[in-house]
Amino acid sequence: MTDADSSNSTGSPGSSDSSGSLDSPDTGPSTSETYDEFAASRSDPRFTDWLRERAGDSWDDATAHRLTRELAADELADDVFRQYLVQDYAFVETLVGVFGHAVGTAPTMESKSELVSFLGVLTDDEDDYFLRAFDALDVPESVYSEPKTTPATRAFIDLLERAAGQGGYAETLAVLVPAEWVYLSWATDAADGHTNPDESPSRFYLSEWVDLHAVDDFEAFVEWLRAELDREGAAASPRRQRRLEQLFRRTVELEVAFFDEAYELAPSGDSTATATSPASSQSGDGGASQPGDGRW
C-alpha cells in the first residue's frame, strides 16, 4: 500500500460512515504540527511521544478518568463496573482480531512472535479474568456472550476494523498503541498509589484489573509496540504521518467516551458523567446515546 493510499483508506477526517462512527475533526492541540517540527526540537525524538502530545487533553482525560480513579480507590459502583466490563468484553473480541491482522502484516518473524505471544494473554489470562468477574458480579452468560453494544463501543470497534482492514501495519499500530498505552498509564498510576497490599481494592475484580495492566510484562509489551510505531511512523510520508496521528487521537477520544458511558448507561444512571471529549457526543448513531441504549 502506498502512502497516498494509506492516508485516505480509513475515511476522511470529520466524516461519518454507515455505522455512525465519526473520525476526529482535523484540528489538534497547539503542539508541533508535524513530526519533523517535533523531532527538530529534541535530541532523541519518538514518533509516539509526538502522537501523545497531539492527543492533547484527551490523553489526560483518558488516563486520569473518574472511572479509573474510583476503581483504584475501591470506590467504583458495581453497576458502573458491570456496564463497563460487559462492553469491554465485547470490544476485546475485535481487539483480538486486529492483533491477529497485525500478525499477518508485521514485517519480521520477531514482530509476529511478539504479537502472537500477546494474543495468548488476551485469549487465556484475560479471558479467565472476565469469566470470573462476570460470575462474581452476577452477569448472566446471555448478557456477556451477546451484549447490546453501546454507541462508543460500536464506534471503537468500527475504528479498529477500518484501521486494520483498510490500512497497513502502521495504521493498525496507530490504534493498538493508544488502546494499550492508556491502560498501562492509568493502571501503573493506580498501582504506584498503593504502597502496601491493604490499599489495593478489596474486590478482586477491581484489584486484578489493575494488576493485569500494571505488570512488567505488559509494560515491556507496550514499550515494544511503541518502538514498532516509532519506526514505522518516522519512516512514513508527512501525509501518512498525519493520518496516523488522527487514528491515534481518535482512539484516545473513544477511550474517554467508553469510560463516560459506563456511568451514563449504568442502571443507577449518573447525570454527572458529562462528556469530556468530542468523542462522547460523536460516538455513534449520529449523536448522543438514547436512554437505555446498550443497557442490560
Image (cartoon, grey):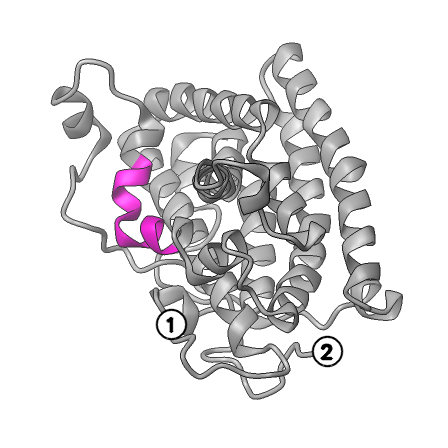
* Horizontal side, residue 199 vs residue 226: left or right: right
N-terminal label among 2 and 1: 1
Identify the residue at horizontal 58%, vertical 29% (top origin). 215
Q: Main secondary structure of the magenta part?
A: helix
Identify the residue at horizontal 41%, vertical 44% (top origin). 248
Which kind of residue does numbered mark 2 sit on? Trp
Residues in magenta, as a range: 51-61
Give how far across and how far down residue 133 sits, in percent: 77, 55
In the picture shown, does residue 227 fall above or below 185? above
Q: Which mark is residue 244?
A: none
SS state under label 2: loop
Which kind of residue does numbered mark 1 sit on? Ala
- Closer to the camera, 204 or 4? 204
In the picture of the structure, the residue carrying the numbered disc 2 is 296
* Horizontal side, residue 286 vs residue 242: left or right: right
In the picture shown, does residue 286 fall above or below 133? below
Q: Quadrant of residue 32?
A: top left
- Closer to the camera, 26 or 11? 26
Asked whether residue 284 appears in the rendered view, the answer is no
Residue closest to the far bottom: 291
Give how far across and how far down residue 54 sits, in percent: 26, 43
Give how far across and how far down residue 35 sits, in percent: 23, 30
Identify the residue at horizontal 51%, vertical 28% (top origin). 222
Asked whether residue 43 appears in the rendered view, the answer is yes
Identify the residue at horizontal 50%, vertical 38% (top origin). 191
Tell me if residue 53 is in the magenta stretch: yes
- Location of the C terminus (image quadrant): bottom right
Q: CA distance from mark 2 to mark 1?
A: 21 Å
Q: Which mark is residue 275?
A: 1
